[in-house]
Amino acid sequence: MKKTIITIITLVAVATAFYFILKSNKEKNEEEVAIVAQTNSEVAVRVSAVQNEEISEGFSVNGSFIPKTTAEISAEVGGQLIALKVKEGSVVKAGQVIAQIAQDKMDISVSNAKANLDNAILTLERYEAAHKTGGITTAQLDQAKLQVENAKAQYESAKLNSGDTRVITKVSGVVNDKKVEVGAVVNPGAPIVEVVDISSLKLRVEVDEVLVSRLAVGQQVTLVPRATNEEVTGTISFIAPASNGALKFPVEITVDNSESKLRAGMYATAKFASEETQARLTIPRAAFVGSVSNNEVFVVKNGVAQLTKIKSGVNYGEKVEVVAGLKAGDQVVTSGQINLTDEAKVRIIK
């Protein structure tokens, strides 16, 4: 019994010792974490000063090329497609026959309608002769005349429906997409192929409302396609009379592509040149939190990052005009925003 009591006391003592050791280690770890947290409480960021500088009135806008013409070539009549004379990539000319629709059933319909018309005309002639001798009534003669008119309408309808069973392209270009295969039954108006003309292309861009008034149809613009990085000259061919929902005006710039170096869908930058300069308050594009349209930046004051709402103006590419919310010399965060919250402490790094 005495031995058992001693054993229990020993186990309790050991457990108590372990408890105090673990508690001591926990407190030590918490102190170390607190020290690390205090050390790393400052977010490392890079900043740039708001500058008042002379900026060229020229500006750049990105856009993508669209083809001169895109057309779906359709069948005028319905029926089975028995021949397709082109394939994807084929060059076609306006007026070229590209496919053929089966004509047998259409010829039968026209023949039947013509036979009905001829029969109605013969019947009318007999009724007219009989009417002169009093063999039929005037009402019966009028009914025979009506049947002739109906037969004529049916005949004309059959001829119209038969139409030209050839499928002819109305535009020149390259077959970009084949919609059906030979043997398929198509309806009138069903697309057979898509033809795209890229002999010239149009770069479609959207220009800010404060800039569009500087542009005019016929004005030459330098374009830099991303695929080739070689400058080409285009001409403004269209300026939208109304803006879209974002107060941007669609503008189209036409460029010669007779050598087919460019393709529809490629991206390019339009550089609208100007010799005039103007003093503008600017910040780097990288300073914006999210996109430029959010109009939010972090301004560093006394080691603290403050989320600030501003009003941006003209986008000059890597720099953006500031209309309101900042002054020259303010420090805006250009790197590290992802780790920031409003009023976070920061450490500026070079």
Image (spheres, grey):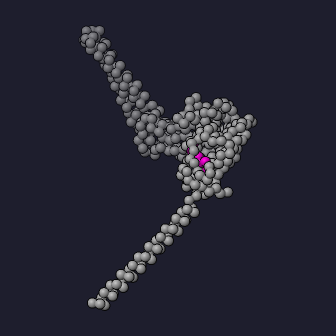
Q: Main secondary structure of the magenta part?
A: strand
The residue nearer to you, when weighing 167 against 345, is 345
Residue 290 visible in the current orientation? yes
Classify residue 176 by image quadrant.
top right
Q: Position of residue 141 (x, y in %)?
A: 29, 14
242 lies left or right of 109: right
Q: Position of residue 12 (x, y in %)?
A: 36, 81
Q: Position of residue 168 (x, y in %)?
A: 52, 36
Q: Is 227 one of the magenta-colored residues? A: no
The residue nearer to you, when weighing 165 against 18, is 18
Q: Residue at x 27, y 9 (%)?
A: 133
Q: Residue at x 57, y 44 (%)?
A: 308
Residue 204 visible in the current orientation? no
Q: Residue at x 58, y 51 (%)?
A: 305
**How many numbered marks appear?**
0
Q: Quick check: 38 above or below 266?
A: below
Q: Residue at x 34, y 19 (%)?
A: 148
Quarter of the figure with the N terminus: bottom left
184 lies left or right of 285: left
2 lies left or right of 161: left
Q: Position of residue 62 (x, y in %)?
A: 62, 42
Q: Return the residue found at the far front.
A: 2
Quarter of the figure with the C terminus: bottom right
Q: Return the residue found at the far top.
A: 133
The residue nearer to you, when weighing 119 against 302, is 302
The residue nearer to you, when weighing 50 against 289, is 50
What's drawn in magenta, residue-wise? 295-300
Q: Quick check: 252 above or below 230?
A: above
Classify residue 103 by image quadrant.
top left
